[in-house]
Each structure stands twice: as C-alpha cells, then as structure tokens.
Amino acid sequence: MLRKNTADEPSLRTGIILKNGGVKRVSRLLYGARIAGCKVLGPGNRAVLWVFGCPRDCPGCIAKSFREGTPRETTVQEMAEWYLAQDAEGITISGGEPFEQAEALAELTEIIRREKDAGVIVYTGYLYEELLDRAKQESAVRRFLNNIDLLIDGPYLQERDHNQPYVGSDNQRLLPLTNRYAGQMSYYTEAVGRKVEIRLSEKTTLLVGVPGQDQREIWRRVKKLNDTNVET
C-alpha cells in the first residue's frame, strides 16, 4: 500500500548519476497493468493504465490485485513513451488509487499533452471535493486535476452496485472537468448494460471494464482455465 503524500512531498524517485558527477532525478510509477486498444472504459480507442496501491479496502472490489501483491515499476518517461506509441484518442487511468501517485501522474499527463492532444479520464475513490481540499496544500494533486478531462469519483459501495454502465456503484459521479467530453456524455448516460473485455496473455487473465456479477464469474472461469494452461 502506498502512503499518501503530504504537502508537496515528492513521489517515488530514483537518481541517475551523470557523467559530470551530477544526479538526475527520475520519477517512477508503480502500476498493475496497462493495455492499448480498449473500447469499454471511455469514448474512442483508449489506452488504459491501472496504477498499483490503494489505501481503501472496499468489500467486493474487483481490483484487489492492484492493491496487494507485487507491483510493476517503471519511469514516468517510459510510460509516456509507451502511451505515445499507441493509436489512442486518450488514456483512462484507474487502479488502485491514482491520487496516491499524484505527482508521477501529473508529470505523465503533462509529458503526454506536450506531445499529443490526448483526453484524460480518471477513476478515483476520493470525492472531487476531497481532492479540491488536498489541492490547496498539495501541488501534485492540483497539477494532476488540471490535466483531467473527466473524473469519475467516489468509493465503490457494494450495496449500491446496481449494474449501472461504467461506474461500480450508483454513488459514483461522472464529472467533466473540461469541455472535451462534455458533448459525449451520452456515451455514459445512454449506455445499456455493462461491457467488458477479457485480455489473455501467457501470464495474466485481465478483466477490463466495470463488470457485473455474471461477467465476473465468466472471468473467474476463464482465468482458472488460463492459469491451468500456463502451469502445464
């Protein structure tokens, strides 16, 4: 689990010793998974990044693997280069809890937007009002918020999970922070049912999207079969 940054506290960083003896600070990012070509977590063709680490333990959470276990680690620059190599309208960032790595993600989205017109969608367990309060003291939170076009906020509440498309429970809100997706909100509001993708690789069976109970069960069955094949 990641500890919440205090005011202006740096995120994960490492130092590279330069030939002149100086040290270049490099921001690093902990993540659970990343994919390209996603159609179920926002308008258009999207890249998706699931960051690792979350201070919450919401009953029924489908993403516990991004809170427990061993994360992947990379530099912010490498992650930006990965995104820029994709044919994507934008990036959706989930987790885990993105705002536990606000500085690294602020830097990531700033690098991406210097190079490409990219839409940024973020899922967070925090309320927007809580983030605005933190932003008064934490410049990283303020910078990250400034780069988000659509924020989907609020904790997952299992008792309020009624299979609404694109949100885990009905307390979660779709908040356009810019005009980028304001004219495309029908993508969310007129959607019927939940849509997911199952991505298979030699090592993982990744469930992509916001699943219903039936979809979770199908994923568990596929995962069991895929894991058995990997082991043999």
Image (cartoon, rainbow, N blue to C red):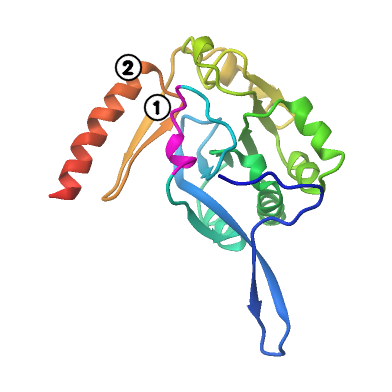
Q: Where in the figure is residue 63, as x and y percent of width and height? A: 46, 33
Q: Residues within 10 Å of mark 2 (few under 14, many from 20)?
A: few
| Disc 2 element | helix
Q: Residue at x 46, y 13 (%)?
A: 163
| Disc 1 element | strand
Tag on residue 214?
A: 2
Residue 223 lies in the magenta-colored region: no
Mark 2: amino acid: Asp
Please tell me whether the stretch drawn in magenta is mainly helix, strand or loop: loop
- Alpha-carbon span between mark 1 and mark 2: 11 Å
Q: Residues within 10 Å of mark 1 (few under 14, many from 20)?
A: some
Mark 1: amino acid: Val
Residue 66 lies in the magenta-colored region: yes
The residue segment tinted magenta is 60-68
Query: Is residue 31 positioned above or below 211 on the image?
Result: below
Q: Where in the figure is residue 217, as x and y percent of width and height? A: 29, 22
Q: Where in the figure is residue 23, as x and y percent of width and height? A: 71, 78
| Quarter of the figure with residue 115 | bottom right
Q: Residue at x 52, y 45 (%)?
A: 52
Judge whether residue 41 can be spotted in this image.
yes
Of the residues under marks 1 and 2, which one precedes in the sequence? 1
Considering every residue shown, the one lying at the far left of the view is 232
Residue that badge 1 annotates: 196
Of residues 40 and 59, the one drawn nearer to the viewer in this rendering: 59
Give the foreground label among 1 and 2: 2
How many numbered badges does the structure rendering display?
2
Q: Residue at x 54, y 39 (%)?
A: 96
Query: Is residue 11 positioned above or below 193 on the image?
Result: below
Q: Where in the figure is residue 167, as x and y percent of width and height? A: 54, 21
Judge whether residue 119 can be spotted in this image.
no
